Image: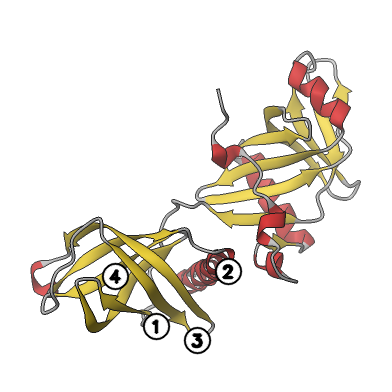
């Protein structure tokens, strides 16, 4: 049986299409790296260790020792996948915190046998990559922001529309269609949609309308639930950055 795709490491080479492209996903602050790993340990979160020879072993973070530069995973010393990890020495760890995918290298894996339990030790990671799960939760724009999508009506090409963005996620968004605009039917594709999320984030993509739902009687419009069709790496990076920044600002406002 094939492993689910979202437990596999993301190809960093595919994202690194330009100098500095990975910086939007990379966390190098030692304090932030430690905080994320501590969340994995405290939550007993499952971590998939993907070896270079194609094997995978599911474990949990057992101990953190940044002063000594080691990270330990729980391990069954008799498991064949553990032996394969030790032989390969290196692996890529993948775990999820809610809708956030974390990925980091586990270098120099060594099996340490104990009286009652064993552990896989590796070098403490210097960086962690953070990705929003593709079908993760959506964020609503901040109240002071008014993101807009500029589109042409698929059935009336001469009609240009500016539709308010209600929420956005990696791979999708919701738009507000006023009731004085000719309706759109689910399943249609809208090409060359320009979405201005903030002064730093403008993306152009193709949308597929998934569903149309009413919001409330006095809203005078409907919600268009859209999926992005084959978004480019530049679009994904822009969305990731916007979502991260919006989430951080929302957390600051709630303090």
Residue depicted at 65% across the width and 36% down the height: 47
- Earlier sequence position, callout 1 versus callout 3: 1
Give the mark toward the camera: 2 or 4. 2
Sequence order check: which comes first, mark 4 or mark 1? Answer: 1
- Residue 158 pos. (x, y %): 23, 84
Gap between marks 3 and 2 measured at Cα = 16 Å
Give the left or right position of residue 81, taking residue 149 as reference. Answer: right
In whole angstroms, how far apart are the C-alphas of marks 4 and 3?
A: 19 Å
- Labelled disc at residue 234: 2
- 16 w.r.t. 87: above or below: below
Q: Are marks 4 and 1 in contact (CB under 8 Å)?
A: no
Residue under the image location 46 percent in, 70 percent down: 250
Q: Is residue 113 left or right of residue 211?
A: right
Q: Distance between the residues labelled 2 and 1?
A: 22 Å
Q: Residue furthest top?
A: 78
Mark in front: 2 vs 1: 2
Rendered image: mark on residue 175? 4
Number of the label disc, if any, that sits on residue 199:
3
């Amino acid at each position: 049986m094939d492993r689910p795709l979202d437990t596999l490491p993301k190809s960093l080479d595919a994202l690194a299409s330009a100098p500095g492209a990975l910086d939007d996903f990379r966390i190098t602050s030692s304090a932030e790296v430690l905080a994320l790993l501590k969340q994995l340990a405290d939550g007993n979160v499952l971590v998939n260790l993907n070896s270079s020879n194609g094997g995978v072993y599911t474990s949990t973070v057992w101990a953190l020792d940044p002063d000594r530069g080691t990270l330990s995973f729980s391990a069954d010393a008799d498991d064949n996948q553990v032996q394969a990890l030790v032989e390969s020495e290196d692996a890529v760890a993948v775990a999820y915190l809610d809708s956030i995918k974390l990925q980091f290298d586990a270098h120099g894996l060594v099996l340490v046998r104990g009286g009652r339990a064993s552990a896989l030790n590796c070098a403490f990671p210097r960086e962690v990559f953070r990705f929003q799960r593709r079908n993760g939760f959506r964020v609503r724009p901040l109240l002071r922001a008014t993101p807009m999508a500029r589109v042409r009506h698929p059935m009336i090409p001469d009609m240009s529309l500016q539709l308010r963005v209600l929420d956005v996620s990696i791979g999708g968004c919701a738009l507000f269609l006023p009731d004085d605009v000719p309706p759109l039917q689910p399943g249609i594709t809208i090409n060359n949609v320009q979405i201005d999320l903030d002064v730093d984030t403008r993306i152009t993509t193709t949308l597929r309308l998934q569903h149309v739902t009413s919001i409330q009687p006095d809203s005078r419009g409907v919600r268009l639930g859209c999926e992005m069709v084959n978004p480019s790496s530049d679009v994904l990076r822009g969305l990731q950055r916007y979502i991260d920044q919006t989430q951080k600002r929302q957390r600051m406002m709630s303090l």
